[in-house]
Amino acid sequence: MPDRRPPRVVGAGQVKRPFGVAVDEVGNLVVVDRDHHRVLVIDKAGDVLRTVGRGQGSGAGQLKSPTGVAVDGAGNLVIVDWGNRRVLVVDAAGEVVRTVGRGEGKAEGQLQDPQGVAVDGAGNIVVADYGNHRVQVFDAEGDLVRTLGRGEGSGTGELRSPVGVAVDEASNIVVVEFGNHRVQVFNAEGEVVRTLGRGEGSGAGELHCPTFVAVDEAGNIAVADRNNHRVQVFNAEGEVVRTLGSGQGSGEGQLQFPQGVAVDEAGSLVVADCGNHRVQVFANAAAAAGAGGLRLQCLPAAARPLLAGHAPPARRRALEDGRVQAQLRVLRDVGVPLRREEAEQVAALARCEELREELRQLEEGLVPRGDRIAALQSQQQAAAAGFEEAVAAALGR
């Protein structure tokens, strides 16, 4: 379904070849302004709050063609200083508090053309070591913890020119391979648990020189499909559930060699539109479709992430306060294709609502009562129980 709401444009006239993007803890955009050798922090009004980088160079706090950026749990900016083959951790005052990487090279801890960066829940720094065809994970102090990638190649677990990295809610590391036109997802043991991308190409699900990546709260994976001038969003099953970019160009919603992607606090997708020297912010799928701005990143998966991983009491609270029902109504009303378990939940919810409405009319005397109230109350309780069972079944519980 195409987005109806035009994207918001940020940074036009301020940035040149934006690369990595991130969102800080208060919702400001963090944009790597690559050709100006700096990083900008931009508020929601589009105003630049601060600039990080003391000019082009290799000295303390200087940057040389930076690429990726992330924000750690302390609010520090983690910046890939590509030209200097290092990663800088910069605090709110603009001071470098740590340097990650042991110089240029192939040895452990050394970097060769580093690109993307992410920070996991433990504060570890994940770096796409592009030129060495590997991903290196450093702890918060800058010491190497582990390496992903079984050498250069196209086999499972092998990497070729990794660019983007992200960490999902399960602490899996998502790696975009520019050279293999695919995405591999590694678990904590370094095993590949999922591969996205149907080969090199321009069809749905195919990728051509993909670059950066982001993961939303629902576990959907947004991939900058660089040479196809679009961003594709994959769900947990590897299906494309949304595509951003209305073709190559500089018009509204069009993209030109997109690079960085991020998800903001409203579920909107932030895209570094590198070739157009701007950043575009695409509203989350529900808001873009005119469905009231619920925070649903990709509608077909929306009914499950709310409850997935929650104990029964948490599921009960989510059902009682209506959040599950609200998400299901959006799925139904927007008209996206439903999976079997979603259709079952929507049907069960519809039955509950029909009985509730009939009961209301009876209680308010809008239709003859007879002895229908007691029977309807019993049917409604049974329908409500059926709805909860449908939700639990969809979650595998």
Image (tube, helix red, strand yellow):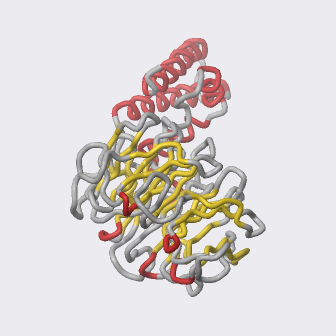
The reply to whether residue 282 is visible in this rendering is no
The residue located at (57%, 80%) in the rendering is 37
The residue located at (43%, 48%) in the rendering is 174
Left or right of residue 20, residue 210 in this image: left
Query: In which quadrant of the rendered view does residue 44 lie?
Result: bottom right
**Please, is residue 78 above or below residue 237 in the view?**
below
Number of labels in the image equals 0
Query: In which quadrant of the rendered view does residue 243 lie?
Result: bottom left
Q: Residue furthest right?
A: 93
In which quadrant of the rendered image does the N terminus lie? Answer: bottom left
Q: Position of residue 216 (x, y in %)?
A: 51, 49
The residue located at (43%, 34%) in the rendering is 189
In-front residue for pair 380/91: 91
Q: Position of residue 69 (x, y in %)?
A: 56, 63
Q: Position of residue 35 (x, y in %)?
A: 51, 82
Left or right of residue 178, residue 307 in this image: right
In-front residue for pair 240/23: 23
Left or right of residue 3, residue 196 in this image: left
In-front residue for pair 385/124: 124
Q: Residue furthest bottom?
A: 13
The reply to whether residue 93 is visible in this rendering is yes
Q: Position of residue 230 (x, y in %)?
A: 36, 67
The residue located at (48%, 35%) in the rendering is 304
**Please, is residue 335 above or below residue 50 in the view?**
above
In-front residue for pair 1/101: 101
**Please, is residue 365 above or below residue 243 in the view?**
above
**Please, is residue 102 above or below residue 48 in the view?**
above
